[in-house]
Image (cartoon, grey):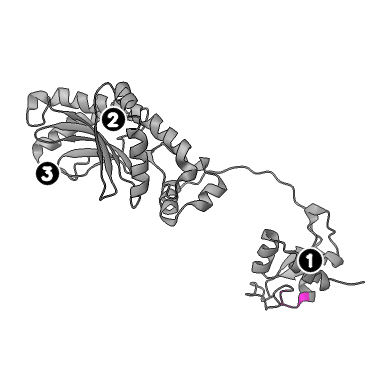
């Protein structure tokens, strides 16, 4: 067990006994498989995004807790807390006991806590019951809260300016793959940073893509480049660099796209710098099309 953050031998001993039970209770969720001790009091699941389930043991009480503390996202944390608090009665009924609701005004974080005053870490005889409490009640809190957080995401995603990924130690409550391109585009930079950190992988997923491409005639392609003589036929600037063979680097473009019925012919081909080529495929502005048609081969 990684004991970094623990200071006293008795706490190291307790958590070394409790951790296997807690991990067993969450084995199908993956939660608490990664963990850290934030101080000499409690253990938290691996922070991914900012919403964290934790187990703690003070000298006079113990607790399990949902901490809403996404970095730099007070509005997001408060939105999630308010959504849950509006459903306080039904949540506590599902949980089976009352919870302590603490909405921070001056800081980013808010907390939803269940206290245990009966089993204390200072009493070794309580340890089996305390470990059972941390295992079963952290699991119960996770089971009750996670569906509400998923619904909060679904109901509020489009209305939120800041929206990081929120997950439970590697188990996504929000799946980044469910975002549309428009939703990703509308995210703020801090939200994108947290999403990107969550999505980063040393082993990218491979996928097989089958597509058809039009075969370009190599003679026509070479002719277009030679005719341009190293100058982009749209921006009229020299090629940005040279190839390994020392030739100006330009890309061949069909003014009327092949996929739209354009011909692979002298009258429909130009040579462009990479920037202008990408511009044509992204925007294909009518004014640019007109300019290119003027400089194609004329019989």
Separation (CA) of disc 2 from disc 3:
22 Å
Q: Secondary structure at mark 2?
A: helix
Quadrant into which the C terminus falls: bottom right
**Mark 2 or mark 3: whose residue is earlier in sequence:** 3
In this picture, residue 105 sits left or right of residue 255:
left
**Mark 2 or mark 1: whose residue is earlier in sequence:** 2
Q: Of residues 190 and 203, which is closer to you in this image?
A: 190
Residue at the right extreme, as displayed: 299
Does the residue at mark 2 contact the one at mark 3 (Cβ under 8 Å)?
Answer: no
Label 2 or label 1, whichever lies nearer to me, is 2
Say which mark, if any, is on residue 23: 2
The residue at the point 50 percent across, 44 percent down is 158
Q: Which residues make up the magenta segment?
A: 228-232
The percent position of residue 215, horizontal first and vertical second, equals: 79, 55
Q: Of residues 153 and 209, which is closer to you in this image?
A: 153
Judging by the rendered image, the residue that carries numbered circle 3 is 7
Separation (CA) of disc 2 from disc 1:
62 Å
Q: Secondary structure at mark 1?
A: helix
Does the residue at mark 3 contact the one at mark 1 (Cβ under 8 Å)?
Answer: no
The percent position of residue 102, horizontal first and vertical second, equals: 24, 39
């Amino acid at each position: 067990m990684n004991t970094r953050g623990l200071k006293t031998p008795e706490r190291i001993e307790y958590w070394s006994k409790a951790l296997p039970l807690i991990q067993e209770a969450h084995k199908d969720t993956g939660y608490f498989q990664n963990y850290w001790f934030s101080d000499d009091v409690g253990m938290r699941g691996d922070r991914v995004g900012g919403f964290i389930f934790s187990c703690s043991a003070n000298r006079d009480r113990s607790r399990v807790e949902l901490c809403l503390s996404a970095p730099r996202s007070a509005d997001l944390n408060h939105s999630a807390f308010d959504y849950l608090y509006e459903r306080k009665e039904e949540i506590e009924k599902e949980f089976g006991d009352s919870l302590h609701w603490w909405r921070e005004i001056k800081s980013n974080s808010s907390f939803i806590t269940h206290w245990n005053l009966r089993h204390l870490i200072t009493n070794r005889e309580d340890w089996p019951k305390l470990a059972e409490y941390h295992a079963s009640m952290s699991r119960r809190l996770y089971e009750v809260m996670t569906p509400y957080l998923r619904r909060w995401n679904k109901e509020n995603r489009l209305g939120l300016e800041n929206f990081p990924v929120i997950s439970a130690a590697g188990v996504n409550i929000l799946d980044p793959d469910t975002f549309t391109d428009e939703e990703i585009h509308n995210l703020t930079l801090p939200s994108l940073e947290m999403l990107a950190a969550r999505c980063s992988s040393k082993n990218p997923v491979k996928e097989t893509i089958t597509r058809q491409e039009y075969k370009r005639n190599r003679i026509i392609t070479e002719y277009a480049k030679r005719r341009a003589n190293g100058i982009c036929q749209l921006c009229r600037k020299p090629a940005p660099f040279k190839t390994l063979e020392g030739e100006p680097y330009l890309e061949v473009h069909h003014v009327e796209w092949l996929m739209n019925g354009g011909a692979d012919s002298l009258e429909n081909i130009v040579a462009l710098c990479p920037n202008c080529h990408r511009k044509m495929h992204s925007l294909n502005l009518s004014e640019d099309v007109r300019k290119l048609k003027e400089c194609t081969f004329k019989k």
